[in-house]
Image (cartoon, rainbow, N blue to C red):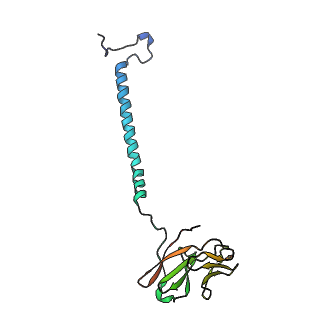
Amino acid sequence: MEDNNKRVTVREQDDNYTHNIVRLNERSLDRRGFMKTMVGAAGLFAISTLPWGGLAAKQLFAKEENPFPKKKIADVATLAKGEAMEFHYPSEHESALIIRVGENEYKAYQNACTHLKCPVFWGKEEKELLCPCHHGKFDVMTGKPVAGPPRRPLPEITVQVENGVIYATGVKPYEA
Ligand code: FES
């Protein structure tokens, strides 16, 4: 029976710098080396993806955070029923209007007209939100346009009353 571990050598005259390689050993080393490389690469890949997995899990299970600040509008006592007050929300550059429509009911909107951005004001007599530029009108309970050129509602600001203070808590997403 032939010995498989027999040293295979290359004749001296064929020397191409590989005559001292034991081919069978080289093959087994190759396989082992390959396996080690693959295991190493798989381990490296698994470790490198851990932070992304963590991030994805955080995104998946985290509650959706409100991107808007909670900001004081006024004390309840300073806003009589049927009256309105201007304020700014969410930033100091965004003008808004709050109307006390009932004893414990408030409606608030960003008051840049959805037609061409003129400031909308509270028509106390008409009980509507009015735009003086092109006679646009908005329903105070929904913010939807009811007359004139505006086609989109005013963005509504959510409010919350706590211990006699009215706060703005967010802007409702636009619904077509
Ligand atoms: S800007 Fe308000 S109706 Fe035109």
Identify which residue is drawn at 48% across, 67% down: 67
Q: Quadrant of residue 39?
A: top left
> Where does the image place residue 176, in percent across and percent down from the top left?
59, 67
> Where does the image place residue 167, in percent across and percent down from the top left?
47, 79
Q: Quadrant of residue 129?
A: bottom right
Q: Quadrant of the N terminus?
A: top left
> Where does the image place residue 90, in percent across and percent down from the top left?
53, 73
Asked whether 74 or 39 is in front, the reply is: 74
Asked whether 128 or 92 is in front, the reply is: 128
Q: Is residue 95 above or below residue 54?
A: below
Q: Is residue 138 left or right of residue 101?
A: right
Q: Is residue 143 left or right of residue 77?
A: right
The count of marks equals 0
Asked whether 41 or 58 is in front, the reply is: 58
Identify which residue is drawn at 64% across, 73% down: 114
Q: Is residue 132 left or right of residue 91?
A: right
> Where does the image place residue 82, in percent across and percent down from the top left?
54, 88
